[in-house]
Amino acid sequence: MNREAIWNLLPHREPMLLIDEVELLPEGKALGRVHVRGDEFFLQGHFPGNPVVPGVILCEMLAQTCCVLLKPQTYCYFTGIQNAVFKRRVVPGETITFVSEIVRSFQNFIFAHGECHVDGELCMKSDFSFVMAKEE
């Protein structure tokens, strides 16, 4: 699914719609991609002359990839990020691949796991949770 299809599915809007494409895999996982161009808002001050994608942005990209699995009619709000491990930096010109899956759910709480890679190399992995809530 391309950016327009994601835009129609998720409530995120510019500049916070961060994923470029997502593919739903048969085993219940989502495969997302982000092409880091270098002009993104989060690179402007992180760091001048040595731009690096912030870890918290990687977490958000991973969560957005996972939320596509839910086809939400509501909002997904982070409730936790656990066991986040950052293995390498991500810089402009690279394409990040995200794989996320829902591990379990309870009522409106979702528990998930995901990883991000560049050229097959692990950049980051995390367990995370969010709650699905209607717009107020």
Image: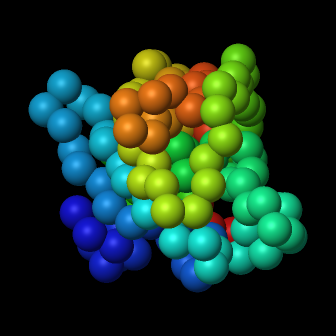
Residue 35, percent from left and from top: 44, 63
Query: Can residue 45 be spotted in the picture?
Result: yes
Nearest the viewer among 70 and 117 is 117
Q: Is residue 38 left or right of residue 20?
A: right
Residue 15, percent from left and from top: 63, 79
Q: How many numbered circles does the render carry?
A: 0
Q: Is residue 97 left or right of residue 86?
A: left
When asked about the image quadrant of residue 129, the answer is top right
Residue 13, percent from left and from top: 56, 78
Q: Is residue 49 left or right of residue 112?
A: right
Nearest the viewer among 66 and 95 is 95
Residue at image position (38%, 38%) is 119
Residue at image position (60%, 72%) is 38
Q: Residue furthest front?
A: 49
Q: Is residue 114 above or below residue 9?
A: above
Residue at image position (22%, 63%) is 1
Q: Is residue 81 above or below residue 76?
A: above
Q: Quadrant of the C terminus?
A: bottom right
Q: How is the image coloured?
A: rainbow
Query: Can residue 74 be spotted in the picture?
Result: no
Residue at image position (81%, 68%) is 49
Residue 62, percent from left and from top: 53, 44
